[in-house]
Amino acid sequence: MIHPSVRTAPGADIDPTATVGENSSIWHLAQVRDQVVMGSGCIIGRGAYIGSGVTMGDNCKVQNYALVYEPAVIGNGVFIGPAAVLTNDEFPRAVNPDGTLKSGADWHAVGVSIGDGSSIGARAVCIAPVSIGRWALVAAGAVVTKDVPDFALVAGVPAKRIRWVGRAGHPLDSVGDGRFQCPVTGSTYKEISPDQLVEESK
């Protein structure tokens, strides 16, 4: 079901079995496939692809030519940058060992999951079945091969954590004793371990 308030640009392709929430926008040449469930207030950019059965929360932005392959699970308020890719095949091959063309029945799709508030930078690649934590930030061009903790800023090939970020997306400043502060909001965070940061105040 497509909510009557959804804005659909010319050339957008939305499967009739997809669910698209109110006040969402699907731009030119974007494709939203069968059984997709998309929340309200989402923006799907020009030429973006949302694969069969992908679920997406409210207020997400999928930028131009990003590819979100099934069965990805995307939380609320997620940003997916231009030409970013969420993969779904751990062992990709076009053909079987005997040289015959693979069919849809010859492999098992695995998805990427992205927590609320996270951002995936332009041309980043997330290799399924990784999970991206809440409010994490994947730098442009990164290749994510391992799970990303909440509030982590990861960069590089393969991606590694280089900083912590807050809800505002800015790198946090260390204030000593394993605590960090957002330079934008003043919110404070505490590092529990090298892979775990928790909010103390919002």
Image: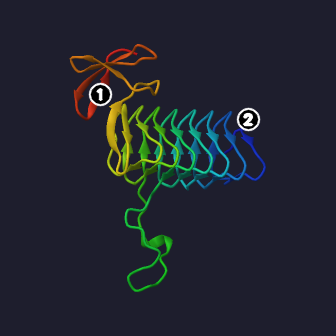
Instruction: Give the mark nearest the N terminus, 1 or 2.
Output: 2
Residue that carries the numbered disc 2 in the rendered image: 5
> Residue 167: which numbered mark, if any?
none
> Comparing marks 1 and 2, which lies closer to the viewer?
1
In the image, 198 versus 24, the foreground residue is 198
**Counting other residues with Cα less than 10 Å from the Cα at mark 1, is it few (<14), some (14-19), or many (20 or more)?**
many
* Residue found farthest to the right: 10
Q: Position of residue 54 (x, y in %)?
A: 52, 50
Mark 2 belongs to which amino acid? Ser
Q: Nearer the viewer, residue 200 or 53?
A: 200
Name the image quarter holding residue 188.
Answer: top left
* Left or right side of 32 for 6: right
Q: Hey, what amino acid is under mark 1?
A: Leu
Q: Residue at x 66, y 52 (%)?
A: 47
Q: Locate residue 24 relative to residue 134 in the image: left or right.
A: right
Residue 59: horizontal and vertical position, in percent?
58, 33
Q: Quarter holding the C terminus?
A: top left
Please, what secondary structure does the residue beneath circle 1 have? strand
Residue at 50 percent across and 34 percent down: it is 76
Separation of residues labelled 1 and 2 (CA atoms)? 39 Å
In the displayed structure, 111 sits above or below 96; it is above
